[in-house]
Each structure stands twice: as structure tokens, then as C-alpha cells.
Amino acid sequence: MISSQELRQKSIDYRKTILTMIKRSGTGHTAGSLSCVDILNVLYNRVMNISPQNFASPHRDHYIHSKGHSVEALYAVLADRGFFPAEQLETFSRYQSHLVGHPTRKVPGIEQNTGALGHGLSVAVGLALAAKKDGRADRVFTLLGDGELAEGSSWEASLSAAHYKLDNLVVIVDRNGLQITGRTEAVMGLESLPEKFQAFGYAVKTVSGNDVAELAQAFEQLPFEAGKPNLVLARTVKGYGISFMEDQVKWHHKVPSDEEFAQAMRELDAAALNVSPLAATETARVL
Ligand SMILES: Cc1ncc(C[n+]2csc(CCOP(=O)(O)OP(=O)(O)O)c2C)c(N)n1
Ligand SMILES: [Mg+2]
């Protein structure tokens, strides 16, 4: 099993990949990708039974990237997992590339087109219900933005998830407190979210969503409660890992300047230096 220390190193590498793709193409959803990449890292490298080898089969876990605008994070992880060659990342947002600004099924490893917010959970509920009806042990994971929760369809799908007792459904909310134009609580108030999800019938766990070890530990406890859909409320920082991007609404869709890009890479290099000393302890804990 991959250690937390290796996961931390991957998160740094993925952040470099995301920023490089965005810098090269001159477009992208910067802060939302940095917010959720630790979640994708843990799901694809530690938790989900999904690979290029089993993707064509229904007997595997499923992932729906409902906050589709943060596709750079998904591309970085899928390429690393071998769903397509990493060199293809260089074509991100280029004419005739399949690696466009929101997920499509033309990209190997992507199960559902997303980007119009508010649809991923309904698709995930359908997949989870189908797995139950077919007697399959597959689990269905989906990642929603907190701003995305303003879409009423999320709550309609949640009613169905509880009604059909979909304990094979894992909904993760990237709770970074920001959406496209400002703070979620100013645009469309959500709190108190844990209580809302509990009232909708979920078994809820709140985690630190940029901490790979904490995420892994939470996912290891799935299913949280028999007969209930699972909700992971991941408290994250939008733009996590780059000091001047963190918790700044302007970085939702902003491309770093040459100086900003260089500074970001320096910060990630510095973070990588901090990963190594933890190696012994972390590996020991995992073993
Ligand atoms: C149906 C729909 N309405 C509006 C948008 C435009 N839009 C793109 S990202 C975004 C904000 C999403 O905020 P959040 O879900 O919190 O994402 P994150 O903070 O993780 O980037 C909006 C409103 C959209 N993609 N789809
Ligand atoms: Mg958000």
C-alpha cells in the first residue's frame, strides 16, 4: 500500500503538473484544482479499485467529477495512473485535443461529462443504485464543490440516495468556502452543512481535506453506517499549497504570470524538501 509520505510527494507533483498545464495553455481553473487534488490523489492511489485494466468492466469502483471545472486535477492524476500518456497533458486546452477545460468521456478514465454543475450526484446515485440492483460490490465516489450545492438537484439526488439506502455511494464535498464570485456564505449560505446532510440521511464524516493521511483514514472506514449514503465533508483551502493563491477568490480562473509561476514552483520545491524527513515515521505507521 502506498504510504502517506508517498501520497504527500504525489500531491506536490500533481500541483506542479496542474500549474504547468494552466501556465502553458494560458487558461484553467487554478484554485479549485489545487483545492481538490489531495482528495483525488488519495482516491486514485489508495482507495478506489479502478485502473486502466479494469475500466471497461462494470465490476470496479466508479468516480464522477461533479465539480467539472477543476478538471486539471483529474487529468494530472489520470495520466499518473496510466489512463493516458503523460505527454498528452501538454495538449491541454489546445485545438483538437480531447483534454478540454471540462471532463468528457473522450478522455480515457472519465466516466461522465461534467462541468454544468449540479448533475454529477444524480449520475452517481443512478450508478450506485444499478450496482445494488445487479448485486455488485462496486462503490461510487463523486466530488462536489460547496458552491455547487446551490444547485437544487444536489438535494433531490440526496433524497434518492437515502431512500434507496445507497451505502455504496460516497459523496465528497470540497468545502473550501469559496465559489466563483465570492464566499459561499455570501453568495448562497450553506451552513450548517453537517446537520443538513445528516438530516438528508447521510452518515457524515468531516475531515481535513488537504491532509492525505486524514483523508485515507476516513475512507478506510467506509461504509460509515450500513444502509446510509456516505458524506465526506472535506474542509479544504482553495488554492492550497501556493501561499498567494490560498483562499483568494480571484484565483478561481486566473493564470499565473511568469513571476507568479516561478514563485509557485519554488514553494512546491520547498514543500517537497519537507516531505522527506517524515519518511521514516510515516512509513512505520503505515506498515
Ligand atoms: C450550472 C452551472 N452554473 C454555473 C456555472 C459556472 N461556474 C463554474 S465554477 C462555479 C463555482 C463553483 O464553486 P464551487 O462548487 O465551490 O467550486 P470550487 O470552489 O471548488 O472551485 C460556477 C458558478 C457552471 N459551471 N454550471
Ligand atoms: Mg468552493
Image (cartoon, rainbow, N blue to C red):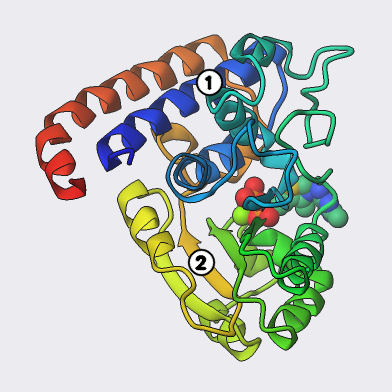
The image position of residue 280, as x and y in percent, is: 10, 35
15 left or right of 116 in image: left
Q: Residues within 10 Å of mark 2 (few under 14, many from 20)?
A: many
Q: Is residue 181 in view?
A: no
Residue lying at the far front of the rendered structure: 135
Q: Say above or below: 195 vs 31.
A: below
Tell me if 57 is positioned left or right of 81 in this view. Answer: right
Give SS at disc 2: strand
Front-lying residue, 176 or 104: 104
Q: Quadrant of the N terminus?
A: top left
Does ligand 1 reach within 8 Å of label 2's beta carbon?
A: no
Q: Which residue is mark 1?
A: 17
First of labels 2, 1 by sequence position: 1
Which quadrant holds residue 154?
bottom right
CB of mark 1 near ligand 1 (< 8 Å)? no
Q: Is residue 92 above or below residue 156?
A: above
Q: Are marks 2 and 1 in contact (CB under 8 Å)?
A: no
Residue drawn at point x = 63 percent, y = 62 percent:
146
Q: Where, by quadrant of the figure, is residue 143 drawn?
A: bottom right
Amino acid residing under circle 2: Val
For the point 70% across and 28% down, which residue is it?
A: 28
Residue 195 % position (x, y): 54, 86
Query: Front-most of 66 and 245?
Result: 66
Q: Is residue 13 above or below residue 87?
A: below
**In the foreground, 40 or 271:** 40
List the residue tagged with mark 2: 232
Q: Where in the figure is residue 45, as x and y percent of width and height?
A: 45, 39
Instruction: Write the residue at 39% across / 55% down.
Output: 215
Looking at the picture, which amino acid does disc 1 mark? Thr
